[in-house]
Each structure stands twice: as structure tokens, then as C-alpha cells.
């Protein structure tokens, strides 16, 4: 619905306001269809009708989720807005263009991990009904998988940042590779932070999560006010990274308070060592072209991950057991 309406609006000469209207209309239409199908399913299978008292209770309980999402949207976009209005050593339009290009490439890493985090949320919530032991074990396993995935991508992106920016956006964007090399480590944290976030939600600590994201938003704006006038988009990149560090440290501290000791540092260290060794392969093959460096790094990481114990034998056993049972988690 969004694509069809948007294409029609563009063909009829519509502008960005028309596109925004198409998006809003499509979301309303999607909600109406989902509501209609859900009610039809309830009537068919159970004869139940919506419990409006429960709906009101859920709406009140959802406010911390809503506030958290607002803060996340704010601190993920405030830096670009501030770059466009604050004076710095680089013209505003150039700074925004370079930073936004690096930011978009950084966000691609988040697409690799978001589906995993969304899928694991119901499992965490169900386990919490039985206590915190299962939640703690699942969170630790999830962190191992995420570290194993994002750290080698971050190392490779750091080493090839200039080449990637030039390849995707043109040679005049190669200079923004320095910002990408900083931002990609922020994305490492922003790939594991959502797992901490859904775990906090699963154990009914959504208010703590709202406080964390709110403080991060304030911290991010304050850093940008200080750093952008001096360092332009590089200052914004460092502000983003440090903001994600704050979210990670605070979130893990709250989880340790409520779940008990967490064994995640060893997993991060093993994945870091394997990724660093892979980085050595990328560095040695880079003189032959960044394409060969990417292929060599991708080929080298799996055996290195096994050698450093990034993925454990019990992880493979769990996956095989769930596949044999027809599970999808």
C-alpha cells in the first residue's frame, strides 16, 4: 500500500508532503485490515470479543514503551538536525551529506540483527513467567550470537571504510570513511543494546529502559553541542558512539541487578580475538584490492570463530535439537 500510493503520488507530481501522507494513510489501512482479520479469527475460533477493560490496561502500560521509542528516534536523528543548523569547520551541507551517507551504511548492520532480537522477545517473556534463570541463559546465548556476527563486520568495515564509502557513494565521499570507522562501533553496541532492551521489557523493567534512553538522548544532545562546532560530523560520530556506550553500560548494569551475574565478557573477548585475526587477513589481502580482502576475510572468519570458541558445541546442539523438534526460535 505504501509503495503503490507513493509511486502514484510521485507520478502525479506530488512532493515530500504527499509521500508522508501516503505513508500515514497506508499505516491506517494496515491497522484496519489487521483489526478486521484479528476480530474475524477470534469470532471463528473462540467466539471471543475484545476485552476493552484489558485494552485500556494495556494502553496505560504501554506508555513506557512509547516514551522509550520517542527517545530512541530522537537521539538517532538529533545529530543530523544539529549538523544542519550548527556552524563548524566544514560547511553544513557537506557535513550533513558526508555524515548521513556514513550513518546509512552503519545502519545496514542493524538490519542483520533486528530480526533476531524481535524473534527472541516472546521466548524471553515466556521464560520470565517461570523465573529468571531461563531469561539469563537465553540473554547470554543471544549476546554470544550477536557478538559473533557484528564484531567481524565492524572490524572489516573499519579497515575498508574509505573503499566502501567510495564504492557506494563516489570518490568524493571517501573522506567520510573516518566517520564510518567510528560509527560502525556504535552500531556494534546498537546491535546488542536492543537485546538488552527487549530483555528489560520481558522482565517488566520497561520504566528503567525509558529512563536509560531518556538520559542517553540528553547526553547525546549535550555531546553534539560541544563537539560539532569543533569537529563537525566527526564530533557527531563520536557523540553517537559514546551515547551507545552509555546505553550499553547502564542497561547491562540494570540486568545484572535483576538477573544476577551475567557471563558475557568472555564471549565478547573470544569474538573480538577471532575478529581481530580476521582483520589481519583483511589487512594482508587489501593491497590486492578491497574485493579480495572482503572475500578473504569472509572465508577466514568461520574457522577462526571455531578455533577461538566463539560458538560453543552446546549452541550447535541446541540449534539441532530445535530443528529436529520443528522449532523456529
Image (cartoon, helix red, strand yellow):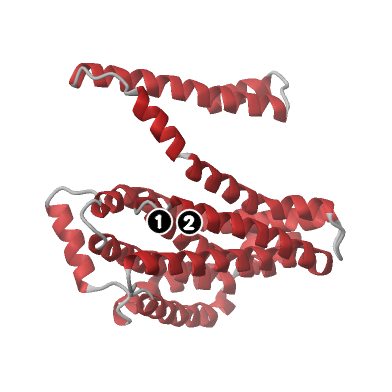
User: Image point 30% across, 81% down: which residue?
Assistant: 307
Q: Secondary structure at mark 1?
A: helix
Check disc 2: other Cα within 10 Å, few if <14, some if 14-19, many if 20+: some
Where's residue 274, x and y in %? 40, 79
Where's residue 318, x and y in %? 18, 62
Residue marked by disc 2: 208
Nearer-N-terminus badge (1/2) = 1
Q: Nearer the viewer, residue 152 or 78?
A: 78
Place residue 139 in its image quadrant. bottom left
Where's residue 171, x and y in %? 73, 61
The answer to whether residue 57 is visible is: yes
Where's residue 234, x and y in %? 73, 67
Dots 1, 2 in contact, CB < 8 A: yes
User: Image point 68% across, 70% down: which residue?
Assistant: 178
In this rendering, the count of numbered labels is 2
Q: Nearer the viewer, residue 23 or 300?
A: 23
Q: Nearer the viewer, residue 254 or 157?
A: 254
Vertical side of 91 occupied by 263: above or below? below
Q: Nearer the viewer, residue 51 or 269?
A: 51
State left or right for residue 129 relative to residue 87. left
User: Image point 15% across, 47% down: which residue?
Assistant: 326
Place residue 170 in its image quadrant. bottom right
Vertical side of 189 occupied by 75: above or below? above
Check disc 1: other Cα within 10 Å, few if <14, some if 14-19, many if 20+: many
User: Image point 58% across, 45% down: which residue?
Assistant: 70
State left or right for residue 303 relative to residue 72. left
Numbered mark located on residue 200 in the image = 1
Amino acid at each position: 500500500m505504501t509503495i503503490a500510493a507513493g509511486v502514484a503520488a510521485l507520478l502525479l507530481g506530488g512532493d515530500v508532503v504527499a509521500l508522508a501522507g501516503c505513508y500515514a494513510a497506508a499505516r491506517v489501512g494496515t491497522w484496519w485490515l489487521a483489526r478486521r482479520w484479528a476480530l474475524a479469527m477470534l469470532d471463528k475460533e473462540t467466539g471471543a470479543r475484545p476485552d476493552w477493560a484489558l485494552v485500556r490496561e494495556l494502553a496505560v502500560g504501554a506508555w513506557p514503551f512509547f516514551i522509550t521509542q520517542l527517545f530512541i528516534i530522537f537521539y538517532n536523528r538529533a545529530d543530523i538536525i544539529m549538523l544542519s543548523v550548527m556552524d563548524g569547520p566544514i560547511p553544513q551541507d557537506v557535513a550533513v551529506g558526508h555524515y548521513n551517507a556514513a550513518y546509512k551504511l552503519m545502519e545496514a548492520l542493524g538490519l542483520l540483527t533486528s530480526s533476531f532480537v524481535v524473534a527472541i522477545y516472546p521466548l524471553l517473556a515466556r521464560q520470565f513467567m517461570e523465573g529468571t534463570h531461563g531469561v539469563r541463559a537465553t540473554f547470554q546465548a543471544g549476546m554470544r550470537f550477536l557478538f559473533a556476527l557484528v564484531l567481524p563486520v565492524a572490524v572489516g568495515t573499519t579497515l575498508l571504510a574509505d573503499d566502501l564509502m567510495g564504492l557506494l557513494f563516489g570518490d568524493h565521499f571517501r573522506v567520510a570513511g573516518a566517520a564510518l570507522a567510528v560509527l560502525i562501533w556504535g552500531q556494534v553496541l546498537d546491535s546488542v543494546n536492543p537485546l538488552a532492551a527487549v530483555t528489560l521489557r520481558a522482565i517488566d523493567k520497561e520504566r528503567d529502559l525509558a529512563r536509560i534512553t531518556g538520559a542517553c538522548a540528553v547526553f547525546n544532545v549535550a555531546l553534539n553541542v560541544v563537539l560539532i562546532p569543533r569537529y563537525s560530523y566527526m564530533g557527531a560520530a563520536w557523540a553517537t558512539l559514546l551515547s551507545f556506550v552509555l546505553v550499553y553500560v547502564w542497561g547491562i548494569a540494570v540486568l545484572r541487578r535483576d538477573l544476577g551475574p551475567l557471563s558475557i565478557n568472555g564471549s565478547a573477548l573470544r569474538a573480538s580475538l577471532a575478529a581481530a585475526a580476521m582483520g589481519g587477513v583483511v589487512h594482508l589481502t587489501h593491497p590486492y584490492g578491497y574485493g579480495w580482502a572482503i572475500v578473504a576475510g569472509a572465508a577466514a572468519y568461520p574457522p577462526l570463530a571455531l578455533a577461538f570458541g566463539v560458538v560453543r558445541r552446546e549452541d550447535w546442539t541446541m540449534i539441532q535439537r530445535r530443528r529436529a523438534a520443528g522449532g523456529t526460535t
